[in-house]
Amino acid sequence: MRVQVAHPLHLVLAAALIGLALAFGGSLALGAVWLWLLLALVDLLWALLVALAVRAAYECAAGDVSAGDQLNVHLEVRSQSPLPGPVLTLRDGPHSNVFWVGPGRNERIGLPSRAEIVVERQLVARRGRYRLGPLLVGVEGPLGIWAWVRAVRSEHEIVVLPRLHPLPPWPLQQPEAYGGAVARHSPYTDPAVVVGTRPLLPGDSLRRIHWKRTAHTGVLHVREAEFSAGGQTLLVLDLAESAYRRDPGGEVLDRAVELTAGLCHAVLRGGASLSLVTTAEQEGEIRRVRGLSALPVLLEQLAAARPDGGEGLAARLPRLCERLAPPALVLLVTPAAPDQWAAVIPALQARGLRLAAVLCGDAPPRAVQRLHRLGCQAWAATSAAHLAGQLVPAGRFGAWGALQMPRDGV
């Protein structure tokens, strides 16, 4: 608890009275100065006695909360003092994790003696793991000269999850134009188990050509491998501090977290096992999860994501992929320009790994095109909804499919 001047106008008045007393002297001016000092002392002691008897609790009933949700928050103020607090001031403290909706950011209400006041407000939550607050509660004296201010936080921690925008299922399945059959474009296939053939499509490897079927029909056909839902995906969220230096407001970071949350949902919904890691975490065993039941745990992990990683993506990525075996997919979410980390792609591809990247910064088209030329499918997205629009099948080719197919202008 600290004391502060409630209204600077009183200090201006005091300075004027002291100036008059020094300039002209006289009992009237000196009496006015002493009277003001006496009133200021009474106001200070009055506000202190009320503040010592005030108890404030700042709480909200929060279950599963996502960023942007409105929370019903109430502040209970109880005063056991025999003296009334003429003015009770409520306002957001510095670095508050929530902000008021509509009026009420700086509210002044009366506080009678031996009273209980409940202030109900709607708050919009920001992503993170924290206690609500601080909310500054100030008790002023009857003359409004001084105020005793106390910072109030919630006693219970709440977790605000990133907003989840579901993306198309992973891997994507869609009908092809050839007889209405469903072609599964997936990075997880077993080349040893052939279930049929189909006409050659752009991006197919020539090593998959089925020569007997081609000779019989006169049209190039490729072997269709059995789809496997058990493929592994390593989803890497770039949290290097250097990648977010131009993001003081945290907008790009929230965008990256939102995209990662949507990708987690899409991968788990598609049946693949998922390992979510960030460049800010310490070295250790990478945990694999499967099924949508694991999604809440991953969202809680993303809720506390902060750009505090010391190493950039180029330095960390090879170590994260050390234990991956083909045909695992490495999916990157980063605001960093490819010039900083694209050099590691060929080495990973040489091990049989598939790579894809979602650029969440202001990536120019040439950055996406460069990744395509390297055999890394890439999308530039400003939001999860924007990315979902790019992943919706258009024409005969699935957006998730053919991850190593070089294409421009995605």
Image (cartoon, rainbow, N blue to C red):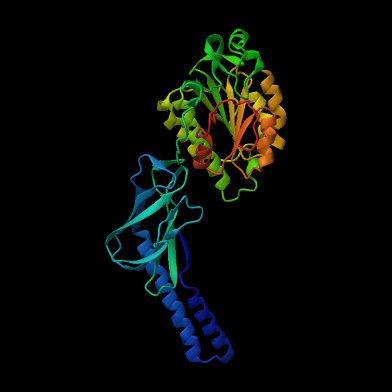
Placement of 151 over or under 347, stated as above or below: below
Placement of 145 over or under 99, stated as above or below: below
Answer left or right for 305 relative to 244: left
Please say whether residue 86 is visible from this viewpoint: yes
Please say whether residue 279 is visible from this viewpoint: no
Where is residue 63 drawn, in percent x and y?
Answer: 35, 40
Please name the residue shown 54% across and 19% down the image.
188
Where is residue 153 drawn, in percent x and y?
Answer: 42, 50
Residue nearer the viewer, 243 or 366: 366
Placement of 151 over or under 65, stated as above or below: below
Please name the residue shown 69% across and 19% down the image.
350
Residue nearer the viewer, 333 or 57: 333
Answer left or right for 11 relative to 121: right
Answer left or right for 7 relative to 320: left
Which quarter of the image is occupied by the C terminus? top right
Which quarter of the image is occupied by the N terminus? bottom left
Residue nearer the viewer, 393 or 165: 393
Please name the residue shown 64% across and 48% down the image.
246
Where is residue 150 drawn, in percent x and y?
Answer: 43, 58
Where is residue 326 drawn, in percent x and y?
Answer: 60, 16
Placement of 183 over or under 248, stated as above or below: above
- Location of residue 371 by image quarter: top right
How many numbered tags mark residues here?
A: 0
